[in-house]
Image (tube, rainbow, N blue to C red):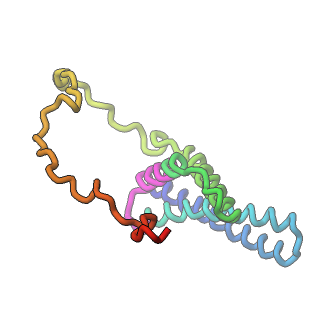
Amino acid sequence: MTIFRDHLFKMCEQAVDAVIRARSDLRDAMDKHEDTALAAAMDQAAHTVPYARWWIDLTRTIEHGGLDPMIALTNARTAARQSLLQSGQPIPNRSWFTIAQSHATAEATRRFYHDTAIFNVEAITGPGPSAPSITGPAYPTPPRTTATPPHQATHPAWRPAINPGPVLRPHPGPDTPLDPNRW
């Protein structure tokens, strides 16, 4: 697994190098004051930073968390998939920067998920044990019963309310005149 671990760390280094290049291009574009170069550099930096963040989290989990590289990659892919499935549309009243950043993060997550799909578990670790054959009887299914409607079910008897309290009494509120001569 050290070859696979080294490959994941190399992918992380490449992603971090891409962030360094993107930030350098962004600084150069800011110095030149060209709108088209600045927009392209901002787009590149906005997409490379979240992509590298996925790789950094993966390698930190392997290095400091002590997880097996395959398990860490599987966990990271599961987190990326959940992030893609649960991410909704950005709130319209937020700033344009926040909306653009959320789109760039979603695209980086999608790219990380697809880039890590090339790692075939069976090609790296070999075929796993086959599923055991079913030898015993199947679990018995519970008998089907018809559901009782809620109004026919047995509930504890509620005592009727004797005194409804102040709910039905008139209450002098802000719109209720206290003095009849006031109006």
Whole-percent x, y for residue 82 in the image: 48, 49
Toward the front, the furthest residue is: 181
The residue depicted at 48 percent of the width and 54 percent of the height is: 76
Asked if residue 47 can be seen in this view, the reply is no
The residue depicted at 73 percent of the width and 69 percent of the height is: 21
Q: Is residue 86 above or below residue 140?
A: below
Q: Nearer the viewer, residue 61 or 126?
A: 61
Within the image, what quadrant is residue 141 found in?
top left
Toward the bottom, the furthest residue is: 31
Q: Which residues are magenta?
A: 63-81
Asked if residue 134 can be seen in this view, the reply is yes
Q: Is residue 94 magenta?
A: no
Quadrant of the image containing the N terminus: bottom left
Q: Is residue 65 left or right of residue 46?
A: left
The dominant secondary structure in magenta is helix
Q: Nearer the viewer, residue 136 or 108?
A: 108
Q: Nearer the viewer, residue 132 or 33?
A: 33
The residue depicted at 20 percent of the width and 26 percent of the height is: 148
Q: Is residue 20 left or right of residue 87?
A: right
